[in-house]
Amino acid sequence: MKGGVASFVAWCAVVMVVVLVAAETAAAANCNPMELSPCLGAMMGTDNPSAACCQKLKEQVPCFCNYLKNPTLRQFIDSPNAKKVAAVCGLQQPAC
């Protein structure tokens, strides 16, 4: 019986690790700069960010460092307007 319990506990631990890795992979797969399209007006002009923009920014926070590594995206993510939008939405510049 002890072997059965130990096997069950080991099996549960393996399942938990697989679920956690899958969740992290799914989260990483959501890094899509096109998701920030509700922020385009605020980042490119003088519009205030909408609630949808702030929500999308918050969802994409784990992706910002990768966006900053991309020269094409960096100019938008690191611009003064983008920093203003992030501040209005209550977000801080990531420390990459």
Image (tube, grey):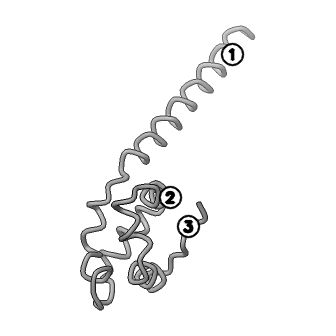
Residue 65: which disc? 2
| Residue 8 locus on image (x, y percent) | 62, 18
Q: Secondary structure at mark 3?
A: loop
Q: Which residue is mark 3?
A: 94
- Image quarter (top left, top right, bottom left or bottom right) of the N terminus: top right
Query: As displayed, is residue 37 above or below residue 84?
Result: above
Q: Nearer the viewer, mark 1 or mark 2?
A: 2
Residue drawn where x is 40% and y is 78% of the image: 82
Does residue 32 appear to the left or right of 87 in the view shown? Answer: left
Query: As displayed, is residue 17 above or below residue 70?
Result: above
Residues tagged 3 and 2 counted as in contact (Cβ below 8 A): yes
Residue 5: which disc? 1
| Residue 4 locus on image (x, y percent) | 66, 10
Q: Secondary structure at mark 1?
A: helix
Residue drawn where x is 24% and y is 81% of the image: 41
Residue 39: which disc? none
Would you identify the image quadrant in which residue 94 lies? bottom right
Q: Nearer the viewer, mark 1 or mark 3?
A: 3
Label whose residue precedes the other's in the sequence (1 or 3): 1
Q: Secondary structure at mark 2?
A: helix
